[in-house]
Structures are given as C-alpha cells and as structure tokens.
Amino acid sequence: MKADVIVIGGGIVGCSTALHVARKGRSVILLERDQAGIRASGVNFGGVRQHGRALAELPLSFRARAIWADLASLIGTDGEFAVTGHLRLARQESDLRLLLLHMQGASLYGLKLEFLDRAALDHRFPWLGPHIIAGTYCPSDGQANPRLIAPAFATAARKAGATLVEGAEVVEATHDGGVFQVAVRDGRRFEAPLLVNAAGAWAATVAGWFGEMVNLVPEVPQVMVTEPAPYRFQPVLGVIGGDLYFRQIPRGNVIFGGGQGRANADHTRSAPLPEISARAAAEAARIVPEIRHLNIIRTWTGVDGDTADGSPIVGPSTTTPGLFHAFGFCGHGFQLGPGVGAVLAELLIDGRSDTDIHGLGIARFVGRR
Amino acid sequence: MNTRVAIVGGGPAGIRAAERLVEHGLSPILLDEAPRIGGRIYQQLPEVRGFRRDGKALYGFEAGKAEDLHAAFARIQPQLDYRPGTTVFDIASDRLITLGDGRREEIAYDRLILATGAMDRIMPLPGWTLPGVFALGGAQIALKHQGCAIGHSVVFLGSGPLLYLAAYQYAKAGVNVAAVLTTAPWLGLGANLLGMAAQAKTAAKGAYYVAKLLSWRIPVIGSVRPARIMGRDSVEGLEVLVDGRLRQFDCDAVALGYGLKSESQLAELAGAQFVFDRAQNQWLPEIDDHGRAVGRDGLYLAGDGAGIQGADAAELRGRIAAGALLQDLGIALKDAGDFGTLKRWHRFRVALEQAMPFPSHLAADLPDASILCRCENITAGEVRAAADQGLREINRVKAATRLGMGRCQGRICGIAGAEVLAAKLGVSVDSVGRLRAQPPVKPVPIEALAGDAP
C-alpha cells in the first residue's frame, strides 16, 4: 500500500500529524501497534501548559495553544479543555531563583506570567499549604481530558481521509531510492516518500534503523484520582522540581501525580508503585492540605520516553531525507501534540514552517554532520 | 527457615488454610477486612453488649459448620499474627499495602494465599438505584450481622441459591416477603440431576427453602422478566413480566442479585493471569488443581475468590492451597487434601450455574436510559453509543464513557457493562475483555495513603 506520508505511532502526535497532512490534501497512512490514543497520549495527567517549559519548546507550545483554543473545530470536541490558569510553586529559597529565571526567559518569548508572593497567593489561593513561599501564574494555561482527546484526534484524522491501520506493529523501515519501505509484523508492507517517527516510548528503535542512536529512558508518570468533592481548586498546580502536579475538574475529582511507576521490559505495560503513591499523596496533602480526607479511588500510569535534556525531539532526520522525528516528549507532550502535527505537516508538505523548532532537532543528541 | 506467609481473608477458605499451615508448624499472618473472622456466610455479630442471637438463628442448617470454623480459629489464633479490621488495598511483589484503623502499613511476605471471597452479581433494571434496593447478599448481611431487615415488605429478585435462602431467612425472621422472583426457568430446580446428585444434601436444602416459602403462601415465580422497580423517592413496588403478562408487587424494598462474582482484584494486582470460565460466565484467576496461581510463583488462591463453589468447598480449597504451599516449601504433608469431595462440589456448581444462570439475555433489553454505572451515572445508552463509535473492548468503553471509574471501580457495574457492550456488538461477553484492576482496590483517604512517606 502506498501513500504520500507514512506515520509510525498513533498517539496524539502521530494522529495530529496524519490529520494535518490529510487536511493538506495528501494521502497518509498511520500505523499503530495497538489502538490509537490508548498509551501515554490517553492516560497522561491532562495539563495544557506553556508555563515552565524549556524556552526552546515555547514557540511550538504557543502554536499548540492557538490550536487548543479552537480544538472543537479541528477534532469535533473540546475534550473538556478549560482555561483555568497554571500556578507554578516555589517551596524553598532556591526554587525562587528558578521561578524568576523562567519568568524572565519566558517573557522574552512573549509568555505573560504573574509573580505572586506569599501575600498575593494567600489572597488568591488561600487553600495553599504553608510551605509554599511564592509562585508564578500563567493565566492562558489550562487543562483537558486526555482519554477523550487522544482518540478524538484519531477519529478526526480518519474523517479527514487518513488511513489508520491499528494492530500494525512496525518491525522494519528502510529508505531506498527516495522511498521508505515499512513492514508490519503480520507481513503487510507500506511505502511512501515521507516518513514520520512518532512512536513514543518506542521511537528510539525506529531512529536507530536510520543510524540515529538516541538514548531514550522510559518515563512512567504515575497519576491518581480522588472521589468527587466540591469544586474549589481552579488552576493547575506544578512545582519547581516537577515532583507534583495537581488539578481539580469541575465535576469534583482531584487528579494529581508525581514520581514514576514501573514498566515491563518492552514498555507495553506499566503499573503504579505503592511507595510512589504514598509520596505523591503526602506532597499533595502538604500543598493543598484540605484534600487530606478525600479518598483516592484509582491510580494509573503510562509510558513515555525521556531525552537527556528533558525536551522532545522534533524535526528532520540528520541522516535520511524525508524522515521526520517527533518523540521523546518526556511526559509533557500532551499540550504540544496538536502543534507538533501542524508543524510537521508544514515541513513534510510545504518544506518549511513559520514555527521555530530549531532547538528541538535530533542533532543535539547524535552530533552534527 | 522463616518463611513469611500471609493469608488475606478470614472466611472459611482463609481459616482452613491458616489451620493447615499451623498444623505443620508455620505461623502465618492472617489479614481480615472484617472486625471478626467468619467471612460472609459464617459472619459473627458485632461485639456489642446485649446484642445476641444464637447460632441456630444466625446460621440455620449451617450452625454446626459455623461453630466448627469459629472453634478452629480459636484453637490456632495463638499461633497466628492475626490482623482484623485490615483492608489490603494494594500488593507489590514482596509486600502487602494495608489500611487498618485509618493507618497505612506495609506487610512483607514470601508466599501469599488470597481467600478474598465473592460479592453479589448485579444485572440492573430501571429503578435499581432507588433507595430501598439492596444487593441480595447485602440484604442477608443486614439481617444476619445487624439484626435488621431492609424493609417491611420485601421482594427478592434474581437467581441462584442465595435467593431462596435469604428470602427464607427474612420470612422466618418475621419480615413480609412480598414475592420471590427468579429469571431462572423452573425456579432453577430443574437442574441436571446428575450434577445435583453430586451434593444431594445441599440440593435438598435448596428444595426445602422453596417448599417452606410456598407453604407460607409466598409467591415464588420462575422465568420472570424484570421490567422495573417503581417509586418516587424510594421503592414502592416492582413490575415483572410473567408469561408475557405484566405483574405488579407492592413492596418497600427489593433484594437484587444473580449469583456471585469472585473478588479477584487483589489476585490481579498480585500477578495472577485470568481465564474466562464459561460455566460461571466470568473471568477468573487461573489456578492449578491445588490453588497455585498459574504463572506467578508463591501465590495461592482459595475459596470463592478463585471461582464460586460455595462455603463447604471453600474450606476444602483453603486446606488444599495451604497443602500446595507447604509442599512448595518442601514440607511433607501430614494428611492428603480431600480432592474427591472437591471434585463433587465442582460438578454440583456447574449444574447449579446451568440451572440458575446469570441472565445475560436481559442486557440487550435494558432501556437506553437505565443507569448501568451508579457511581458515575452512566447509562446503558452511553455504552451502546461507544460501541457505535467503534469501541469493542470494555476498558476502551470505560475510557470513553467513565463506566467503572467511580468509587466502586467497576466492582458493581463491570459485569453488566460488559454484557450490555457484548449484546450491542452481538458477540460473546468474553470477547469484550474485562475491566483491569487498578490500586487501590477500595477507596483510601489521602492522609492514610501518605502514611509517614517523606
């Protein structure tokens, strides 16, 4: 089977890429090992934040944010996206410096953040625990429901004309005479002049087939949810250090996470670890003491890949013309996903994009040629 | 050698497992969620001054067995590390995570026997979330454990042997039993006689309860098709179809249950594999004839938590699983397990399940507006809409609809949810999969979960 573009991986990145390519009138085949949107894309925390990102990610994050603003027109649902703000907290003096440094850097890119000292926090968010010393607040950030959005991207891609092949585990991809040959475990073969590697936690293997060796460490974020309680905590919370993230949804459940669960050898299954649940629960109850009596009803995990510098790999291959990478999202690709698809489609079809992703290339790990 | 053996569950299987381990010189840890041992069938009264009922009133025909089990426990208790009121809510490869008295604790183990029992199996009908509707087993426990009835005038609706037993107990206690209605044909008494003969005494007890109910002029009707439970703020009546004709029964409470399902979440977290059991129409942890979990060394399953076979079989299965554990430790057994009797129980159970099956056929007719998942208010129609979107697996339907995402984590709605999905897709219920267990298996307060974690 032939197409203009083949995408490996049916997460939010792969599906949004297939969607945008199809919308540009090109044929695209997406190959997904299981079902689209059920891995990290569908089980992540659900934060939609620009705040706190590495500066090199910000242009891409802004591009994504613009798409989030009008998501329903693209995928037929807003996926419970709500602009609730994101509050990033400092728990000690040394955090304060990092908070301010990011505020300064992000402002150069045009991201508007408000600095809130303890008095300002007390005024606006009186439920915060006593060990919080200050925070920065990003009013344009928010949250959404991953288990609705990731599959919705798949459905939208299909409706736009993309061919989604589920249950298709890619076992080999080669580039020969300007054409990529992609083989699936059951023997089916696919062919296209352009290939996108959006294989998530498994993408380093695909990159390796083309001589680009990247070390991807499994990232297994562990998230838990409480029974519903009166809606009270609007902004999404994060902390310097990243060991806790927290949000409440209007129907009342509090969702928070922090720390890593465990994954099996091929990263197809993951499970929470009890000691990690305990630590996250302890820190969540310190940051928002009012929740300490709420019951936890469920814990879950998903598997993503971590790069060495904590930012994703997005952009063209250094070895193979026509190959583009988009992986290594380090557990925070949910917000970026819609933007990555738009930018990759431009690079694939138009050969250029106005969104600056030059700091995210794979070259920073495999060495420049 | 100091092997740490933990047993979860203080019912007939757990107690008999502990007893056999003690007979061979071991001192297991026994964790039980209840404040006193006995499990469900041999549950004891709360220890409150002046609140007493004699064994005959509590356990009927089974009073002797209850007394034996309680006595066996009293004998071995000095050799046990006994932890009543302790819920195991998560399991790691080498330790149990427990909640007792609002405190989290970790209990290390080398080998683990799970005897986690069973709970009611529900098929919803319109109105089943009205106050006054109880699970059948819950209705029985209210009477047995607390000396309370669920209403003044009660209809029993469902299938399975517990339906007649609970109705009989209610009637005997002086409650007005308005009707006993079962979806099973021939009241479920037309069972495969060879299978029933495998445990003739137990089969006879079932017939005795039905005969008693009839002699008290209580309507006992088979082959009914449940229509709805009526009432504005609470139960006021129930409607069923009998021979195609609508019949109404006035009542202020309904006891509802279609047999039992194994409580197998802990087995899953501990690493058991699952297989679909056609006779019982449910997913069960896979075990060998001795109760060893297939594919997970050091894990043993006993009693109704590993497939429903009833309390008598649970006692045998507890001893057999303990025997397997002892043999795996290289300890010579002082006595053989009673595999012959167990095999007869198994045949009896298969016949019983055939005679009083889970009413899968009702799933297709459940109105779209009926609530399936009562924690999250998810209707049958929402599950069917997910099927229309192309979802064919119950965990995907959970992700799309929230079915099974509430406080009960699908323990109540999981089975009916899978039936509604399978009926909509026109496939067998095993092909839509089963809801995966996620910790904690019961809700745990954040404060307790945090414990003394840094």
Image: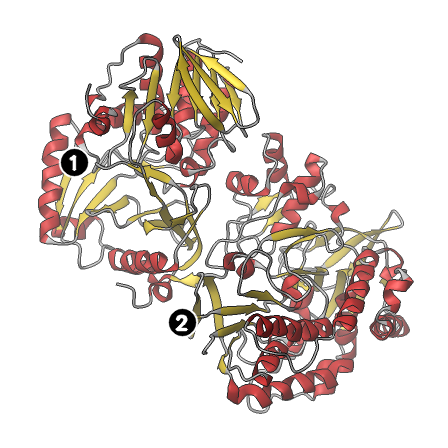
Tell which subunit mark 1 falls on: A
Q: Amino acid at mark 2?
A: Gly
Marker disc for residue B102: 2
Q: Which residue appears at 39% of the width and 59% of the height?
A: A274
Q: Quadrant of residue B128?
A: bottom right
- Could you say where residue A280 lies in the image, as x and y percent from the top left? 31, 56
The residue tagged with tag 1: helix, strand or loop?
Answer: loop
Q: Amino acid at mark 1?
A: Leu
Position of the C terminus of chain A by quadrant: top left
Q: Give the vertical position of B307 relative to A299 (above or below).
A: below
How many C-alpha atoms fall within 10 Å of the one at disc 2: few (<14), some, or many (≥20)?
Answer: some
Q: Quadrant of residue B390?
A: top right
Q: Which residue is mark 1?
A: A113
Give left or right: position of B348 versus B292.
right
Q: Which residue appears at 79% of the width and 59% of the height?
A: B350
Give left or right: position of A27 versus A290.
right
Whether residue B133 is visible, yes or no, is: no
- Could you say where residue A108 lies in the image, as x and y percent from the top left? 11, 27
In front of the other: label 2 or label 1? 2
- Could you say where residue B354 lies in the image, as x and y percent from the top left? 82, 56
How many C-alpha atoms fall within 10 Å of the one at disc 1: few (<14), some, or many (≥20)?
Answer: many
